[in-house]
Amino acid sequence: MIQLQGVHKAFGRNKVLRGVDLTVPTGESMVIIGGSGTGKSVALKCVLGLVTPDAGKITLDGQDVMRADRDAFLARFGMLFQGGALFDSLSVWQNVAFRLQRGAAKRPKAEAREIAIEKLRRVGLKPEVADLFPAELSGGMQKRVGLARAIAAEPEIIFFDEPTTGLDPIMAGVINELIREIVVEMGATAMTITHDMTSVRAIADKVAMLHDGVIKWTGPVADLDHSGDPYLDQFIHGRAEGPIAAVR
């Protein structure tokens, strides 16, 4: 469904992407791993058309993402942001239904609220949470609200940006299970960026490792522990010694 071919992106002298090649098949969950500052978020923004590559091509179902009709293109996506990115001035249900109340596919208020409450239930939150505000929720609850918003419009493709950042191990496990269940139920194509190996093993069908601006390794999640790739091996085991230099 998503294909990156020879994608380059630099910011001034900082060459972030140096020829990224990656294919994300329809209906699969692809997780991109790599250290901080390796270009994972930039790659995701390029797919969304928020950042224009300097070279290379990115296609969605064979269509160049930079030439697509923006509204129709973005309507196919859902996104769970790293920090939740909830609107403080809107209630929980209004956050979840944000897309449903805008654009050509705008729903009546009552219908949008009903859908929002249904999605909140799907992520384990009771209907009474709907009228609260984000500041009244715990970090784990905010993350669930963000997940409910990501799936509210039944997207074909869902992006997860560091979905377990800031959560304790138990809540991180809950979010990982929810993500996996929802992606499978919806038959969605998922693309996740993370450095949390527990998340990787919980939600990935395939894994790609981004380092030094290129994909060093890609393969099924089951092959992680016997890939034979020194970069991947060092990263997943958190070893100080290896081809990846520690930033001091």
Image: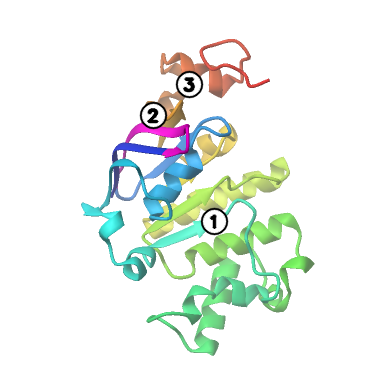
Query: Who's the residue at 60% across and 77% down the image?
Result: 94
Q: CA distance from mark 1 to mark 2?
A: 23 Å
Label 2 SS:
strand
Q: Nearer the viewer, residue 200 or 242?
A: 242
Q: Is residue 62 left or right of residue 236?
A: left
Nearest to viewer (mark 3 / mark 2): 2
Query: Who's the residue at 36% across and 37% down the image?
Result: 8
Q: Which mark is residue 80?
A: 1
Mark 2 sits on what residue?
215
**Image quarter in which the C terminus is found:** top right
Name the magenta segment's main secondary structure.
Answer: strand
Mark yes or no: residue 157 visible.
yes
Label 1 SS:
strand
Of labels 3 and 1, earlier in sequence is: 1
Relative to 11, does residue 137 appear above or below in the rendering? below
Relative to 82, does residue 30 appear above or below in the rendering? above
Q: Nearer the viewer, residue 95 or 177?
A: 95
Query: Who's the residue at 46% across and 37% down the image?
Result: 32
Q: Which mark is residue 232?
A: 3
